[in-house]
């Protein structure tokens, strides 16, 4: 809850707005990269691999806009973004939980943003998501991402095809990786929010337990270093979180894999892989948490972890029956 001093310090002519914005899209469309640009900080892990995001991430961005016309109030908007797992046709239990989380976020949101990879265009996955938005009777804003990969004539044709498939409330072309076009999107979203009090303190960037954030950072390093299907067969949990007297943090995390052969790959020859992953995760955790971090990683085999309800609770997902 925001403190009263900050409320009292606001100009009387400033109108507070707040609302939830769900970011939807196919796997690897660039949703998490876009979210990080909108917030101005890394709140979601990003890798080149599809299905990196597994659970719903709530992140907060503030936009202050000047009066539209003389005599009207300035706008102070709090955008509460819901970054969701990519939507695709799920087959395994974990995939079903991820897709369910994405559609649940869409149902909870005030505004929907559909992110489409311009290079992939209007493919079967994007069509299926559009059909889902139609079925829900919702409006949506289209964001064409990775526009640097497509010639302008093709971009214009793709924009026409997408808007023919669904009457989007607005269309934005962005390059989320470097931020091109992102601020125009943020301003438009702020203007669409309804007046209302803010839900989070102004200096809060995300609504995610630090234990989960720490586990996600380590999982990102695993995704980036490991190959083929192995990253999808593992999960990371922060088992212990110890605040030390010197202000440092001692973290103990467990990497769960499904088979002994996968454990050997994660460890690497002589423990080389796990040491490198730990060093990379430790460095980023120290930066994110602004303190010295002592990170200890353990790799355990739990062949049925994708069928264990407790693992889903740790990831913030509902367990599909």
Image: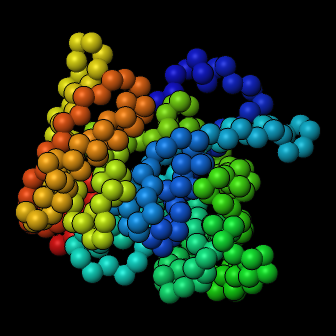
Task: Tell me if residue 134 can be seen.
Answer: no
Name the residue at 30% across, 38% down. 279
Of the pair 53 and 78, the residue shown nearer to us? 53
Front residue of 280 and 318: 280
Residue 50 x/y as whole percent: 41, 68
Task: Please give the name of the residue rendered at 43% of the width and 31% of the height, measured from the top-left corner.
Answer: 287
- In this rendering, the answer to whether 22 lies above or below 243 is below
Judge whether residue 98 can be spotted in this image: yes
- Image x and y of residue 129, in percent: 50, 78
Seen from this angle, which residue lies furthest top? 246
In what quadrant of the picture does the C terminus appear? bottom left
* Residue drawn 33% across the image and 56% down it: 225
Name the image colouring: rainbow
131 versus 320 height, above or below = below
Horizontal side, residue 102 vs residue 90: left or right: right
Q: Nearer the viewer, residue 69 or 219?
A: 219
Percent of width and height locating residue 186 = 67, 51
Q: Please tell me which residue is depicted at 66% across the width and 71% down the height of the picture.
A: 149
Question: Residue 157's image quarter?
Answer: bottom right
The residue at the far right in this view is 70
73 left or right, relative to 92: right
């Amino acid at each position: 809850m925001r403190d009263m001093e900050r409320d009292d310090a606001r100009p009387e002519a400033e109108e507070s707005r707040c609302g939830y914005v769900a970011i939807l899209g196919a796997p690897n469309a660039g949703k998490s990269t876009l979210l990080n640009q909108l917030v101005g900080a890394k709140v979601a892990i990003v890798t080149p691999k599809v299905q990196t995001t597994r659970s719903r991430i709530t992140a907060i961005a503030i936009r202050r806009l000047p009066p539209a016309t003389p005599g009207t109030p300035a706008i102070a908007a709090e955008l509460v973004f819901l970054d969701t797992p990519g939507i695709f046709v799920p087959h395994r239990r974990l995939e079903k939980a991820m897709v369910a989380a994405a559609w649940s976020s869409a149902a909870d949101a005030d505004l929907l943003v559909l992110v489409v990879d311009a290079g992939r265009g209007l493919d079967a996955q994007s069509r299926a998501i559009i059909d889902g938005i139609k079925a829900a009777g919702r409006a949506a804003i289209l964001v064409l991402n990775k526009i640097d990969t497509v010639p302008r004539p093709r971009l214009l044709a793709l924009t026409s095809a997408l808007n023919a498939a669904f009457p989007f409330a607005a269309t934005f072309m962005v390059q989320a990786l470097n931020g091109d076009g992102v601020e125009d999107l943020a301003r438009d979203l702020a203007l669409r929010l309804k007046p209302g009090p803010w839900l989070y303190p102004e200096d809060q960037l995300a609504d995610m337990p630090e234990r989960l954030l720490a586990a996600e950072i380590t999982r990102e390093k695993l995704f980036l270093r490991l190959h083929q299907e192995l990253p999808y067969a593992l999960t990371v949990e922060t088992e212990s979180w110890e605040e030390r007297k010197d202000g440092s943090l001692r973290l103990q995390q467990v990497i769960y894999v499904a088979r002994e052969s996968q454990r050997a790959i994660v460890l690497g020859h002589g423990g080389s892989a796990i040491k490198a992953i730990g060093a990379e995760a430790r460095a980023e955790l120290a930066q994110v948490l602004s303190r010295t971090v002592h990170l200890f990683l353990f790799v355990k085999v739990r062949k049925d972890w994708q069928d264990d309800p407790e693992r889903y609770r740790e990831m913030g997902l509902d367990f599909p029956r």
